[in-house]
Amino acid sequence: MRREKRGFWIAFCAVFFYPIGWLTGQSRYEGREHIPATGGALIVANHISHLDPIFSGLIVERSGRVPRFLAKHSLWSVPVLGQALAGSGQIPVYRESADAQQSLRDGTAALKEGKVVIIYPEGTITRDPETWPMHARTGVARLALTSDVPVVPMVHWGTHRVLDGYNKKFRPLPRGPITVRCGEPVDLSAYRGRPVDSALLREVTDLLMVRVRDLLAEVRGEPAPVTFYKRAS
């Protein structure tokens, strides 16, 4: 398998991510064939733990591609981590500011340049009591519709048992099962070419999150809820 050129900072991160991935769980990476070997791709994932980006990155890296994340801009101010994010071409997200649209423009540019971009549309770790995906932001739909690239659903399961951010619990031992699975790309041909308005963005966002939710139901082996949990405003 021919690998995408990684560069220093991606190789630097891999030195830490691979051991962390091994130490924190017995990991299964499934559906890697759905990540294109070349060209742009948008990966749409659920978010249940602060560990998720490590495992998202590992499944993409194991597929021979370089992961680029849409991540909150405050991380760029963290020593060393900020340098790694900037040096590896990650994409800062500026929420509720004049720079918010710049994140989508940067994400679209990365996809058009043939890069693999990972997005967590919920914007934060789910607060759903049963750990299902929440009602998502529509930025994911705008990225999907303005970039004619495969849109791949991906789910994590098990990372929340290792690191529970809301309850501040870290339980790396005993090493439990962690599954990361990619599904078939979502066919958005029926939506492309239509005027991009708020109704279309909501419809496509919900479609993508239903695919993520259903893929998670397969991994969990239980039925998914019919609605998405909404955070209190």
Image: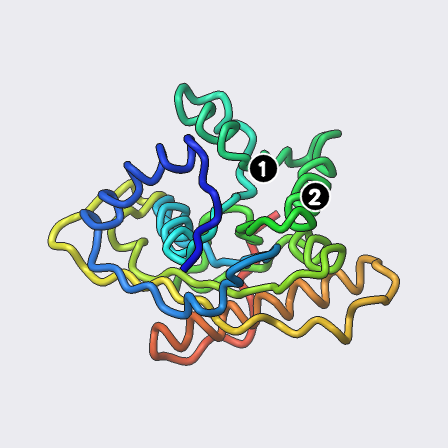
Classify residue 25 as left or right of residue 56.
Answer: left
Q: Name which residue type carries label 2.
A: Ala
Residue at image point 34% right, 79% down: 221
- Return the residue found at the far left: 174
Q: Is residue 166 visible?
A: no
Element under disc 2 = helix
Classify residue 133 as left or right of residue 96.
Answer: left
In this orientation, which residue lies closer to the viewer: 122 or 35?
35
Element under disc 1 = strand
Q: Name which residue type carries label 1.
A: Ile
Classify residue 207 as left or right of residue 212.
Answer: right
Of labels 1 and 2, earlier in sequence is: 1
Visual colour scheme = rainbow
Q: Which mark is residue 114?
A: none
User: Cβ–Cβ below 8 Å for labels 1 and 2?
Assistant: no
Q: Tell me residue 159's x, y (percent).
A: 31, 54
Residue at image point 58% right, 34% down: 92
- Return the residue found at the far right: 195
How far is disc 1 from disc 2 in space, using C-alphas? Answer: 10 Å
> How many marks are shown on the rendered structure?
2
Q: Tell me residue 9's x, y (percent).
A: 42, 31
Q: Tell me residue 82's x, y (percent).
A: 47, 25
In this orientation, which residue lies closer to the viewer: 47 or 126?
47
Provide the residue designation for mark 2.
Answer: 109
Residue at image point 42% right, 75% down: 217
On screen, 146 above or below 99?
below
In this orientation, which residue lies closer to the viewer: 76 or 230?
76
Q: Quadrant of the N terminus?
A: bottom left
Residue at image point 34% right, 73% down: 220
Q: Which mark is residue 91?
A: 1
On screen, 122 above or below 168?
below
